[in-house]
Image: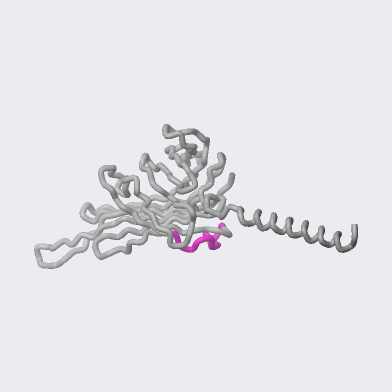
Amino acid sequence: MTMRTHWMHLAVWSAILLSACRKEQAVEAPDMGLDYFPTAVGTWVEYQVDSLWRDDPSNVLDSVSYRLLERIEEHYTDLEGRPCQRIHRYVQDLDGAWVVRDVWTSTVDAYAAEKTEENYRRLKLSFPVREARRWDINVYGTGATGDDTRNDELLVAYEQVDQPWSTGSLSFDKTVLVKNTVPPNFVDTREFEERYADGVGMVYKYWEESTNRVVYNPDGTITLQNVGWRLRMIAVAHGS
């Protein structure tokens, strides 16, 4: 083999290898964001939960704070043939032991992550996770009031995609914020936020629903009465 032939063969093989590398890079699957909603059995997150409810006409104002732990207990197949996760939600008893309070379920495919909360189906994440992508969490018709006869639209969009975030005690390198897109008005307030961390799941939630009522008193004065509630959850520990 002449030196010229050797270099020609070397050039051909180099071109083939370069082409193969480019093909491998070309077929690399994009990151759809599915890791924001883990499905592995044993994955858990513990939350500090603070809830408040107010009913001015009834002179009620109360609140409660507690720890809540959510853990994926098992996989199963639902009646539609979909792979699902069974989630146990634990609270602590008077002795500090974790006891199951309720059981939720979830399912994930290439397009969406769905969670059934207290028997109400909600579309939690829409894939791919991209800035400003919008959807209706209550697309299945089960709304914030818990009234399954009411189609309570809750429009949300992604913000702060793949950004770091910290609770103060926990730090996450990659998170995304899900936030409602309809601003409050003088009568109705709806604030909804959920933040998800890559490989962890939901690490923060704030949900407020309230209504202001104008009451005209006999003496001609006006009183503004508020009826509603708010819920805040923040992750304090997690694992798998």
Residue name at image x 10 percent, y 66 percent: 219
In the shown orientation, is residue 171 left or right of residue 60?
A: right
| Rendering coords of residue 184 (x, y %) | 30, 63
Which quarter of the figure is the C terminus placed in?
A: top right
Residue 205 lies within the magenta run: no
Q: Position of residue 173 (x, y in %)?
A: 58, 59
* Type of secondary structure dominating the magenta stretch: strand
Q: Residue 15 appears at what percent x and percent y? A: 74, 59
> Which image quarter: residue 19?
bottom right
- Specify the farthest residue to the bottom: 221
Q: Looking at the picture, tell me which residue is in the foreground, 130 or 219.
A: 130
Horizontal side, residue 237 vs residue 8: left or right = left
Instruction: Please indicate, yes or no, whether residue 133 appears anywhere in the rendered image.
Output: yes
Q: What colour-coding does the image apply?
A: one colour
Residue under the image location 53 percent in, 62 percent down = 163
Q: Please give the name of the residue rendered at 28% of the width and 44% of the height, measured from the top-left corner.
A: 147
Task: Specify whether residue 171 is in view.
Answer: no
Viewer-nearest residue: 154 or 83: 83
